[in-house]
Image: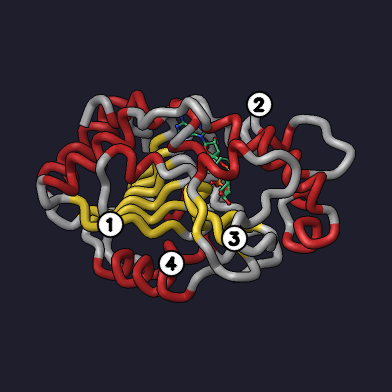
Amino acid sequence: MKEESLEQKIAQLKEWVDASDNIVFFGGAGVSTESGIPDFRSPDGLYNQKYDVPPETLLSHSYYVFNPEKFFAFYHDKILNAGAAAKPNIAHLKLAEWERQGKCRAVVTQNIDGLHQAAGSKTVYELHGSVLRNYCEKCGKFFDLDYIMKSEGIPVCDACGGRVKPDVVLYEEGLDQATIRGAVEAISNADVLIIGGTSLAVYPAAGLIDYYRGNKLVLVNKSETPRDRQANLAIHAGLGEVFSQL
Ligand code: CNA
């Protein structure tokens, strides 16, 4: 059987989107690459740059605990500075518009950059937390991104001197249960599930798509993923190219 063209696939997606009032979007780092934030696994992503210590280790809980200076040097340089000037792109903006129109029920994201909320989305399940929130490990005081950006070395609480930890889920750490519950409920009740900009390699996050029960599972990703064959519609293209036609 001849495979449909990109135009035909986008037309099919547009038809499903136009007809639905219960779209859920599940996304990853590829959603923000067109805002200038590198992802992890693309050829120019963080994992393909050379480090003495692999990024999975640098961003792990034990590394954070035992090597905080090096952790924060990497975190500042590669995570915070990379996103400092980023603005929402067409995919973030379209999803927020669909929410305002009552079409998109939730965005479930593995991203930690806050760009969905910056675009105006309200129901966003941040599976891996957010760089915008930071808490003192000793007294729990909240600190915004600016505080961490301006800190040098290990950020410390101005009230008690405790170490301030980004509210980001590091490797070896568990996901927030309430966030998972919200995401599972949205995905299991969705009519159209659009998965975009994720290699679907990071668990347990990637496993949440198994809760989808419908027959309009759409995958929009530049490269192939282990779940392409499960999708009712798999589109291998950039999100900007696809979303600008919806
Ligand atoms: P990943 O493993 O780096 O995969 C990204 C996927 O997106 C790849 O398969 C790419 O082919 C694809 N892709 C890249 N650009 C585009 C584009 N413009 N259009 C369509 N597809 C594209 O990232 P995952 O999110 O799957 O991995 C999960 C990690 C990455 C999470 O823990 C995130 O916190 C973490 N991360 C987040 C950010 C961010 O918040 N912006 C940045 C880098 C990494």
Give the amino acid type for the residue marked by disc 3 in the picture.
Ala
Compared with 204, 232 (above or below) is above
Which quadrant of the rendered structure holds the C terminus?
top left
Kindly indicate whether the residue at mark 4 contacts the one at mark 2 (C-beta within 8 angstroms).
Answer: no
Tell which quarter ligand 1 is in: top right
Q: Residues within 10 Å of mark 2 (few under 14, many from 20)?
A: few
Indicate yes or no: mark 3 CB to ligand 1 under 8 Å: no
Q: Which one is earlier in the sequence, the residue at label 1 or at label 2?
A: 2
What is the CA distance from the residue labelled 1 to the residue labelled 2? 31 Å
What is the CA distance from the residue labelled 1 to the residue labelled 4? 20 Å
Q: Which residue is mark 4?
A: 210
Q: Which one is earlier in the sequence, the residue at label 2 or at label 4?
A: 2
Give the amino acid type for the residue marked by disc 4 in the picture.
Asp
Q: Residues within 10 Å of mark 3 (few under 14, many from 20)?
A: few
Q: Which residue is mark 3?
A: 159
Q: Which one is earlier in the sequence, the residue at label 1 or at label 4?
A: 1
**Residue 39 falls in image quadrant:** top right
- 157 lies left or right of 222: right
Rendered residue at 33%/53% (across/down): 107
Q: Which one is earlier in the sequence, the residue at label 3 or at label 4?
A: 3
Residue 193, position in %: x, y?
A: 31, 54
- 201 lies left or right of 59: left
Point out the frontmost of discs 1 and 2.
1
Kindly indicate whether the residue at mark 3 contacts the one at mark 1 (C-beta within 8 angstroms).
Answer: no
Quick check: can you spot residue 111?
A: no
Indicate yes or no: mark 1 CB to ligand 1 under 8 Å: no
Q: Which residue is mark 2?
A: 44
Q: Residues within 10 Å of mark 1 (few under 14, many from 20)?
A: some
Q: Which residue is mark 1?
A: 123
Give the SS element for disc 2.
loop
